[in-house]
Image (cartoon, grey):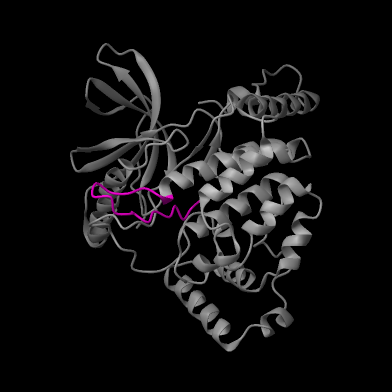
Amino acid sequence: MAAIEFRLPKGAILFSADGFSYEFRENLGEAHHGLSHLLVRKRTAEGHPRESVLLKAVGPPSGPGGRRVYKARARLEEQVRLAQFLQHPAILRTYGLHKVEGTWYLLTENPFGPSLNEHLALVQECRRWFSPLFTLYVGAQVAAALAHAHTAKDESGKPLGIVHRAIDLENVFVDWNGKVQVSDFGTALSKLRGRVASSVRRPRGDIYFGSPEMLLGARVDGRSDLFTLGLVMLEMSTGKNLLYAPDGVTPERMAKLSDKEVRQVDRAILRAHLAGYDSTLVEVIHRAATFTPEDVDAATETLPNVLRMPLRKLLQRSPDARYQTAGELEAELRASLGDTFGTEEAAAEVMEIVRETDKLMEEIDIPGTRRRSVYEVTTR
């Protein structure tokens, strides 16, 4: 189901609720499940601007896609219900659901800084990567958010079994004060009563940030999120992605798979085709089925042991060989950081990257034009 198109002029009022009007600013494209992602600004009844928030929107059901609209609406309601159990400073808040003239809007907190993907774009301009300590710091903050989510319980004290399933560079944000936040539990797996079950097993989020068990269609739990966090930390510190094989996976590697593993790969590829994915996912599935500990060692060989050791454990194919809980990972990363690196040091590193990038842009600037700072461009 394609996302609803919002062809509105900037400044149009989408709806009013609880003493505020919500002013359309930008269509950020499709989120997932056919939901549109919108940036809006809150205004008081007197018209004074307040903070920006994000909306997920789905329009009224119509035509042959109507059934999927109802499913998308159900997922929005599920996200709101799940959000009440996800109250943590490192998790972006969900404010509520508003239904206006057939369109449903889910309001969520707008991060005050760029995503890791945006930060990495700047880092690449500077021809370097994040420092090991910065990577450990972000990893510890995300692990804290995951520990909260993975251990959440419902009103009766029953574990919710939440798995984010989309920890990637787009869903982790670091603001200019060094605060880290995780977004979008809209695709999370949970045991929430009445949740909408997925009809087809497939990866969520960026396919290059999927765990082997998710990509191969096996059962996932919180340890799957830890593997994907390891992929994020690896890319932050080296620019490498373990699941990216530019030359493909060799026949020799595929030949080492057992008959059972070959059947598992074939089923995963069939599910990928049924879900509409292209051949890129097939290559990622092959890589997920065949990467070795030697590949992990090669990807992390330039890193200091303080970062290399946790990455080697995070990036194990078997969930049983990884950290068993996000809390265990958080504790180890924080112990490695000690008192040497915190929010102030993280803020200093991201601002240093901004300064370096601005300097590079000045060197190639066209005379007579007003160039905006990278900080201005990446601050909403």
Q: Position of residue 150 (x, y in %)?
A: 42, 51
* Left or right relative to 132: residue 91: left
Q: Is residue 117 visible?
A: no
Asked whether the viewer can see residue 249, the reply is: yes
Instruction: Report if residue 312 lies within the magenta region.
Output: no
Q: Residue furthest bottom?
A: 259
Indicate the position of residue 257 as horizontal and vertical percent values: 64, 83
Helix, strand or loop: magenta stretch:
loop
Residue 105 coordinates in the image, percent (x, y): 28, 39
* In this picture, residue 369 sits left or right of residue 107: right
Is 237 left, or right, of 202 in this rendering?
right
**Residue drawn at (22%, 20%), measured in percent from left and top?**
19
> In the picture, which quadrant includes the N terminus?
bottom left
Q: Nearer the viewer, residue 272 or 228?
A: 228
The magenta stretch is 150-167
Quadrant of res 103:
top left
Along the line of sight, which residue is nearer the eye, 376 or 261?
261
Q: Nearer the viewer, residue 119 or 148?
A: 148
Q: Residue furthest left?
A: 101
Residue at image position (45%, 41%) is 183
Position of residue 134 relative to residue 189, above or below, is above
Q: How many marks?
A: 0
Going 62% across and 46% down the picture, which residue do you hit?
A: 332
Question: Residue 151: within the magenta?
Answer: yes
User: What is the x, y in percent for residue 73?
Assistant: 25, 50
